[in-house]
Image (tube, helix red, strand yellow):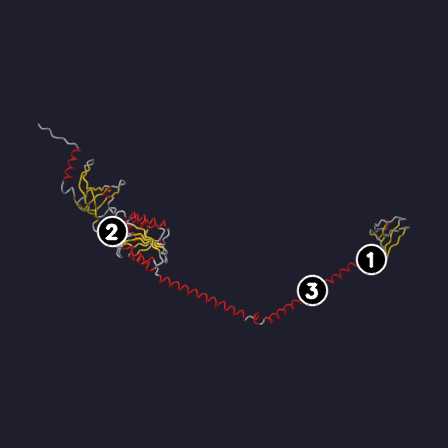
Amino acid sequence: MIEPKIFTVGQINRYIKNLLENDFILNSLLVRGEISNFKAHHSGHFYFTLKDAAGAIACVMFREDAKQLPFVPENGMQVVIYGHISLYEKTGQYQLYAEFLEPIGAGALQAAFEQRKEKLAAEGLFDADYKRQIPEYPKCIAVITSPTGAAIRDILQIAKRRDPGVKIAIFPTLVQGDQAAEDIVHSLRLANEWGKADVIILGRGGGSTEDLWCFNEEMVARAVFASEIPVISAVGHETDFTITDFVADLRAPTPSAAAELATTPLSERQETFRQWITRLERGVQACLADCRRRMDWMMCRPALTRPLERMIQAKAEVDKHWQRLDKAAGQRLRDASDSLKAADHRLESASPLSVMRRGYVMAQRENGELLTSVQDAVLGELLVLRMQDGSLTAQIQEKMVMGYGKEKNHI
């Protein structure tokens, strides 16, 4: 009796995996469906489900393939996936291993463009508040483009024709290919570090969407936004739009138009100078006319037309003030004299001599002490009697005190 062969789970999964991978159809196929349950893993792998009305299949896109996508897949996006079917042995689940996917309707680049535009707009990189004014009369223009393309020739020709005095600094830069975005960022950084340019023209001539794609790269958009020097975007033709156009301070439809926007024709500058000179001359003439009117007005004043009359009037005013001053001073002197006479009269009335002229005598002891009371007198004492015209020496031989109540008379 033949014993049945027993397989392990791993053997079965490996066998099925070999069947799937060796199948002609499943080994390379295109699958159409809607993305759901999308997850971008931190490892760089994409995990999602592709579904339609009839069913669903698990999908995975490894990091190396995911890095080649110009956009990030989103839930609800209708796509066509190129890949192969295989089995994940640990879970026994078969999966679609995506190697590339393309959105249905808009192409991959257009989808990436819209995603990036929406993202940067939400961050404010397109806001008008951040747009800087392009200088009207730049002395130096930095041009970031290919040194061999038609764009640089057009820019040089038009800029020099419009303003022969403007300086053009060329920063040779790759504007197409895988390394173009990094080279543009490097040139923008160099132009800002150099710092001598008043404005930057960044661009290239026309081309396909793929040719212009470096101007849609996020690193380029952020470098343009971070530039301290105003940037004019001049990419492709008038119908071409890139992310750089939205971030730049000014968009020019073509490189030739950028040269026109960055410069002012010499004839316009000369006309501006003529207008300034005319305005200055008018201002000077108006100032001189005003000064002349003021001078004429001053010359008509009496002080200048009849100076002697003004002097006579001034002298009359001085005389009038002098008379008033003299009159006031005389009155003050008379008042002072009257006050002095009154004070002299009061002083004379209070003088002892005046009293003596009326017959009164002032008695003093020999030591000069004034004797004011009879009670203080001593019999036999010598007194000096002072009168209005001299003095007498007398000896007290008798004294008599006279009293009226409590009061006494003092001689």
In percent of width and height, residue 189 lies at 34, 48
In percent of width and height, residue 110 lies at 24, 51
Q: Amino acid at mark 1?
A: Leu
The quarter of the picture where residue 234 lies is bottom left
Instruction: Bin the neighbour count of mark 2 within 10 Å (Cα to Cα): few under 14, some 14-19, many 20 and up.
Output: some
Instruction: Bin the neighbour count of mark 1 within 10 Å (Cα to Cα): few under 14, some 14-19, many 20 and up.
Output: some
Q: Is residue 288 visible?
A: yes
Q: Is residue 280 above or below residue 409?
A: below
In percent of width and height, residue 133 lies at 36, 56
Dot label at residue 217? none
SS for dot 3: helix
Q: Is residue 372 above or below residue 342?
A: above
The quarter of the picture where residue 10 lies is top left
Q: CA distance from mark 3 to mark 1?
A: 36 Å
SS for dot 1: helix
Q: CA distance from mark 2 to mark 1?
A: 138 Å
Q: Amino acid at mark 2?
A: Asp
Residue placed under numbered mark 3 in the picture: 329
Residue placed under numbered mark 1 in the picture: 353
Q: Is residue 267 left or right of residue 62?
A: right
Q: Is residue 165 above or below residue 26?
A: below
Which of discs 2 and 3 lies nearer the camera? The answer is 2
Label whose residue precedes the other's in the sequence (3 or 1): 3
Q: CA distance from mark 2 to mark 3?
A: 109 Å
Dot label at residue 211? 2
Which residue is depicted at the point 16% across and 32% down? 8
SS for dot 2: loop
Q: Is residue 160 left or right of residue 384?
A: left
